[in-house]
Image (cartoon, grey):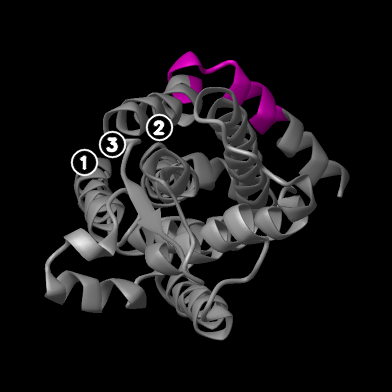
């Protein structure tokens, strides 16, 4: 535990001293929220139960999910492949420290960054778009943020399990990121997307996490299909964990 806490402290220090990482993790999502919110904010998006909200408020949970996907798919996969290429895992293996302690410390740091970005997004949404967040919904919201982070961190680990080059890993993770962001109901409502897309999207992890988070943040509920969405996230996590456990190699 002492070694883990030491690595966690070092990971936090490195993260908060990296201006580029802070820019992309904290400021870029806020910029997208403001940009899309001001352009399309006058449109009303229906919610389950017959109510509706403005697009800017509907987009707010989507921005959080977008950041979760980016941190998991692109951030985690790129870091693991880089560590393998640079021999960082090799150095860890000759020390008393277990590799899982370092990897878990990094994962905890990523989740913390996502939570901070989520709080900033809620604050900006409240200040600019008059979003009224009920803080009684905060525990449920945090639970689904952590669940979504788990899903995409493990999916990023799967990419790192099969790819040995950072450049190729970045191409694959960025392609998946763009597809999930714009075609699974995160940035764009499914109602305006082609029928085939709207039929496939509910089976994607990004849609499931977005639905859970929107229900928690906007309505304080677990959504209209909680068993399907939560069960789907857990299933994706279990499959990704199994694949990464079977195929991930610290040394090639």
- Judge from the rendering whether residue 43 lies leftward or rightward of residue 218; answer left or right: left
Q: Provide the major secondary structure of the magenta segment.
A: helix
Tag on residue 33? 2
Residue labelled with disc 1: 167
Residue at figure coordinates x 67%, y 42% from the top left: 133
Q: Earlier in the sequence, mark 3 or mark 1?
A: 3
In the rendered image, which quarter contains the C terminus?
bottom left
Residue labelled with disc 3: 40
Report helix, strand or loop for mark 2: helix
Q: Earlier in the sequence, mark 3 or mark 2?
A: 2
Q: In terms of image quadrants, where is residue 158?
A: bottom left
Q: Earlier in the sequence, mark 2 or mark 1?
A: 2
- Judge from the rendering whether residue 250 lies leftward or rightward of residue 159; answer left or right: right
Count of numbered tags: 3
Of 76 and 251, which appears nearest the observer?
76
- Residue 125 at x, y = what percent? 54, 31
Residue at figure coordinates x 32%, y 59% from the top left: 185
Distance from Cα at disc 2 to Cα at disc 1: 28 Å
Q: Which residues are magenta?
A: 10-22
Q: Is residue 12 above or below residue 193?
A: above
- Residue 145 at x, y = what percent? 60, 54
* In magenta segment, residue 197: no
Residue at figure coordinates x 57%, y 79% from the top left: 226
Distance from Cα at disc 3 to Cα at disc 2: 11 Å
Report helix, strand or loop for mark 1: helix
Of 78 and 246, which appears nearest the observer?
78
Q: Is residue 144 above or below residue 113?
A: below
Q: In terms of image quadrants, where is residue 179?
A: bottom left
């Amino acid at each position: 535990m002492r070694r883990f806490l030491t690595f966690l402290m070092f990971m936090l220090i490195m993260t908060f001293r990296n201006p580029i990482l802070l820019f992309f993790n904290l400021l870029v999502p806020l910029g997208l929220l403001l940009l899309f919110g001001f352009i399309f904010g006058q449109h009303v998006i229906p919610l389950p139960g017959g109510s509706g909200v403005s697009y800017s408020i509907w987009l707010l949970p989507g921005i959080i999910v977008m950041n979760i996907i980016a941190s998991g798919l692109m951030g985690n996969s790129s870091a693991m492949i880089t560590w393998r290429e640079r021999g960082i895992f090799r150095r860890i293996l000759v020390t008393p420290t277990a590799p899982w302690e370092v990897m878990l410390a990094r994962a905890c740091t990523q989740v913390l960054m996502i939570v901070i970005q989520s709080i900033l997004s809620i604050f900006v949404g409240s200040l600019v778009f008059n979003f009224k967040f009920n803080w009684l919904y905060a525990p449920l919201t945090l639970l689904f943020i952590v669940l979504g982070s788990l899903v995409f961190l493990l999916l990023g680990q799967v990419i790192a399990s099969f790819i040995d080059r950072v450049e190729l890993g970045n191409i694959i993770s960025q392609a998946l990121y763009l597809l999930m962001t714009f075609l699974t109901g995160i940035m764009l409502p499914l109602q305006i997307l082609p029928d085939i897309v709207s039929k496939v999207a509910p089976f994607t992890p990004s849609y499931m996490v977005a639905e859970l988070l929107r229900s928690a943040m906007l309505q304080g509920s677990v959504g209209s299909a909680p068993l399907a969405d939560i069960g789907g996230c857990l299933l994706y996590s279990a499959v990704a964990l199994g694949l990464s456990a079977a195929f991930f190699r610290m040394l090639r």
